[in-house]
């Protein structure tokens, strides 16, 4: 753990519209090079996808990889925990170096308690919800969230098609008055979808295949950020 919760949130707010590379799609045989490349390409933070084979079918990686990435960069690290009962592990991810810990509302019986647990450990707290999950399922949690991660695919795999239901949720969240959590979107974000997400109110974008399947990370991140900036919702 490095930055305080307040400085993480400040840093992410300053990065809006910010494209966060999702390392799930990187070449893990050359992890250090990949982190150096996205950092040099201007990424404001990194998005690390943790999957447990229960909450989602797929398995990805855990603490060891988060720790390794922590040693490779000073950038803020978001861990997107696609795991059942995340309360069992959030402290370990914070110790491993996560600055923003994002849990799923569907994965725990008491999301507010887990968000409070994350903040109590000094990290920023994020809450994700899947395409079929209605906004009403997270509303009571919003005062405890530093960010909300609107899923635009069913989690588990990179490279899936964008689900437009995410746009309605972003519009509703961004229309709320008063202090709001940061609004992030995850899944199927690329040159053809980022503009609509931005217009709907997204501020941060987790991007996997559109970056890691492209030859030039810098140009890709710059183009995505530019499109998001141009389409940005006026509030
Ligand atoms: C999906 C993950 C995403 C994913 C994004 O389960 O949470 O972060 O890696 O990949 P793309 O951008 O390819 O949809
Ligand atoms: Zn993710």
Image (cartoon, rainbow, N blue to C red):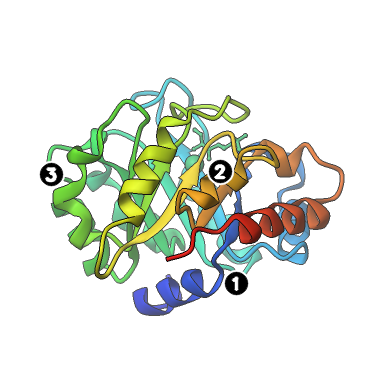
Q: Nearer the viewer, residue 28 or 197?
A: 197
Q: Is residue 159 visible?
A: yes
The residue depicted at 47 percent of the width and 43 percent of the height is 62
Residue for badge 1: 74
The residue depicted at 39 percent of the width and 62 percent of the height is 95
Q: Is mark 1 within 8 Å of ligand 2?
A: no
N-term-proximal mark, 1 vs 3: 1
Where in the figure is residue 4, as x and y percent of width and height?
Answer: 38, 78
Q: Quadrant of the C terminus?
A: bottom left
Residue for badge 3: 110
Relative vertical location of residue 56 with respect to residue 103 in this rendering, above or below = above
Relative vertical location of residue 55 with respect to residue 217 in this rendering, above or below = above
Marks 1, 2: nearer the viewer: 2
Label 1–label 3 contact, CB within 8 A: no
> Residue 32's image quarter?
bottom right
- At label 1, counting other C-alpha atoms closer than 10 Å, the crowd grade (few under 14, some 14-19, many 20 or more) is few
Q: How many marks?
A: 3
Q: Quadrant of the N terminus?
A: bottom left
Residue for badge 2: 196
Q: Nearer the viewer, residue 175 or 30?
A: 175
């Amino acid at each position: 753990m490095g930055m305080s919760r307040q400085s993480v949130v400040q840093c992410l707010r300053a990065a809006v519209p910010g494209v966060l590379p999702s390392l799930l799609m990187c070449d893990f045989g050359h992890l250090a090079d990949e982190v150096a490349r996205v950092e040099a390409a201007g990424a404001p933070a990194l998005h690390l996808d943790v999957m447990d084979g229960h909450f989602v079918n797929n398995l990805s990686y855990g603490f060891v990889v988060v720790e390794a990435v922590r040693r490779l960069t000073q950038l803020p690290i978001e861990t997107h925990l696609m795991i059942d009962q995340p309360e069992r592990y959030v402290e370990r991810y914070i110790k491993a170096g996560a600055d923003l810990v994002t849990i799923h509302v569907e994965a725990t019986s008491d999301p507010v308690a887990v968000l409070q647990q994350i903040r109590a450990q000094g990290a920023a707290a994020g809450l994700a919800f899947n395409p079929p999950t209605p906004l009403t399922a997270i509303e009571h949690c919003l005062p405890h969230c530093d960010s909300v991660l609107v899923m635009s695919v069913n989690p588990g795999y990179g490279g899936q098609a964008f689900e437009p239901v995410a746009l309605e949720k972003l519009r509703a969240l961004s229309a709320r008055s008063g202090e709001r959590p940061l609004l992030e979107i995850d899944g199927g974000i690329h040159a053809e979808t980022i503009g609509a997400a931005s217009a709907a109110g997204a501020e941060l974008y987790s991007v996997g295949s559109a970056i890691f399947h492209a030859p030039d990370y810098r140009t890709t991140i710059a183009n995505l950020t530019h499109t998001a900036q141009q389409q940005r919702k006026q509030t």
